[in-house]
Amino acid sequence: MSQEAAVLFANEAFYLAFSLKDIKGMDELWSRHLPVTCVHPGWQPLIGREAVMDSWIGIFGNPGSPAIECRQPRVFLYGDLAQVCCYEVMEEGTLVACNLFARHGQAWILVHHQASPVAEKPQFDEPTPRRTRLQ
C-alpha cells in the first residue's frame, strides 16, 4: 500500500469512528507518543490527549451530534507527517477540515484535527485530485 493510500485509510477510519460514535475506535486513532491538539468548530483549542479525548466523549454522548460524511479528501505528504484536507458534510452545513497524521512505525496516527465552516458550499460534482505529494 502506498503512503498516500495508508493516510487515506487512517483518515477514513477517523470519519468511520466519528460517524459510528465509536469512542474506542477514536481513541485508537490518536497518538499516545506525540502531543495532540484539536479545534472543533467554534471551540477553543484543545491541547493534550486527555482534553481531546474528553471532547470526543462529550460529542459522542450528545444525541444531537450530527451525522458526518468526509468528501474530497486530499493528501499532502511531508516525510513522516501527512495532512488531509477535506470537507465534512452534515445536514446542518459543510465544514472544511484538516487532519494531521504522523507516521508511527507502519501506521499513521492523528496528532491534530481542525474543522471550520465554509462560507460557500463547495461543488462536489467536479473532480478533485485526491493525492498531492510535496517534497
Image (cartoon, rainbow, N blue to C red):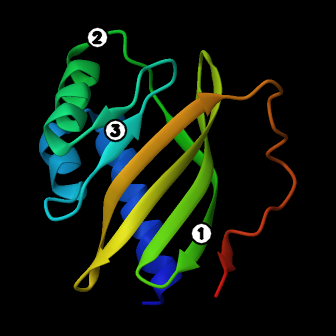
What residue sits 13% from the left and 59% below the top?
32
Q: Of 13 and 38, which appears nearest the observer?
A: 38
Local SS, label 1? strand
Quadrant of the image containing the N terminus: bottom left
Q: Of 83 and 2, which appears nearest the observer?
A: 83
Residue 85 rendering spot, x and y as whole percentages:
61, 54
Residue 69 rendering spot, x and y as whole percentages:
53, 39
Dot in front, 1 or 2: 1
Q: Nearer the N terminus, badge 1 or badge 2?
A: 2
What residue sits 51% from the left and 18% below the top?
42
Q: Which residue is mark 1?
A: 75
Q: Find out whether the residues at labels 1 and 2 contact each other: C-beta distance under 8 Å.
A: no
Task: Compute the Cα span from label 1 to label 2.
Answer: 32 Å
Q: Residues within 10 Å of mark 1 (few under 14, many from 20)?
A: many
Q: Which residue is mark 3?
A: 18
- Residue 113, compared with residue 131, is above or below; it is above
What residue sits 64% from the left and 88% below the top?
135
Amino acid beneath label 2: Pro
Residue 12 rendering spot, x and y as whole percentages:
42, 57
Amino acid beneath label 1: Val
Local SS, label 2? loop
Q: Nearer the N terminus, badge 3 or badge 1?
A: 3
Amino acid beneath label 3: Phe
Q: Which mark is residue 63?
A: 2
